[in-house]
Image (cartoon, rainbow, N blue to C red):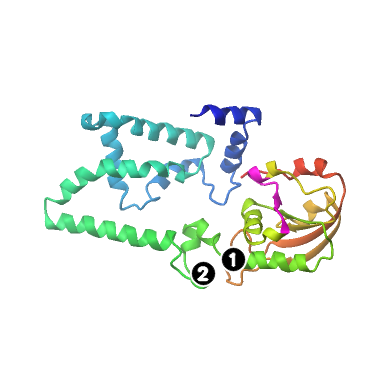
Amino acid sequence: VWAPNLAWQATHGFPQLWLSAAIAAGSSGTSQPWWAFLPYQLVLISPLLAPIWLIGLWRLARDPALCLWRAFAVAWVLLAALFITTGGKAYYLAGLFPVLLAAGAPPVLGWARVTRVRRRLLAGALALAAAVNTVLMLPLVPATALAATPIPAINYDAGETVGWPRFAATIAAVRARLPDTHVAVLARNYGEAGAVDHYLPALGLAHSGHNSYWDWGPPADDTTAVIVIGYQETRLRAWFGHLDLATHIDNRLGLRNNEQGAPIWIARDPLAPWAQIWPQLRHLG
């Protein structure tokens, strides 16, 4: 199963190791220190449900009745050690939670059936966990009210789910002002590049040096203007001879995320061929 992926990694210099190192160094918005990996497991699906999956992990590891599925307990331990060592994110283990919860459910249900108080405690814990997770993880709170809640601070990705149509409209307005026929879009990260590809297909595929977007290559050599998103001026001056600040991204929601306030530049006159500039734009995280 691993052979094709390992072969590709080997022939491309093992970029997964570079990415892991970058994430461990804090380059991702959801990067966490290594020592927080295990504590985060207790809160990922709710602290109220942690006893259930912990019992399930113990049963998978020790209960003779579940020996057929013991590999899941071994997998959890080995993967936890691997992700802590390589700087993986806490949610990388989330795929095992359904198995752990299923293994822990029978003894917890047996405990709850003893008295009415226990049944109510279990029902209350499940209901509260479901309600909190629904609010935190699903887009129930209107985007206009999201900035006034603690949700983006708890769930980083919630802040990244708003503002993309306005982001695309801003890019389209900048493009409309340009008389050039050969215009490319260069985005700082794959989220921005993906938004351009999704909302503005008429502009052609966006370019980015972020992660695997870099593998799809630079703009064409006949590009006369580049709409650059998110890069700072000092960095761009090393690549382009002429820069104009077009505008800044504003989601108009007061919500701080990766794109809010990012500059949009119009860059011209590359100082070197794209084949020389492109390796300098590659970054992982």
**Nearer the observer, 144 or 149:** 144
Q: Residue at x 16, y 46 (%)?
A: 110
**Nearer the observer, 69 or 198:** 198
Q: Indicate the quadrant where residue 99 lies.
A: top left
Residue 248 in view, yes or no: no
Q: Residue at x 30, y 53 (%)?
A: 48
Do labels 1 and 2 touch, CB within 8 Å? yes
Q: Secondary structure at mark 2?
A: helix
Kindly identify the amino acid type of the residue bearing the numbered disc 1. Gly
Say how many tags the image has. Answer: 2
Inter-mark Cα distance, 1 to 2: 9 Å
**Nearer the observer, 234 or 146:** 146
| Residue at which label 1 appears | 163
Q: Which mark is residue 143?
A: 2
Give the answer, above or below, for where 183 lies relative to 1.
Answer: below
Q: Indicate the quadrant where residue 276 lies.
A: top right
Q: Position of residue 225 (x, y in %)?
A: 82, 57
Q: Position of residue 235 (x, y in %)?
A: 78, 51
Q: Quadrant of the C terminus?
A: top right
Q: Earlier in the sequence, mark 1 or mark 2?
A: 2
Magenta highlight range: 203-213
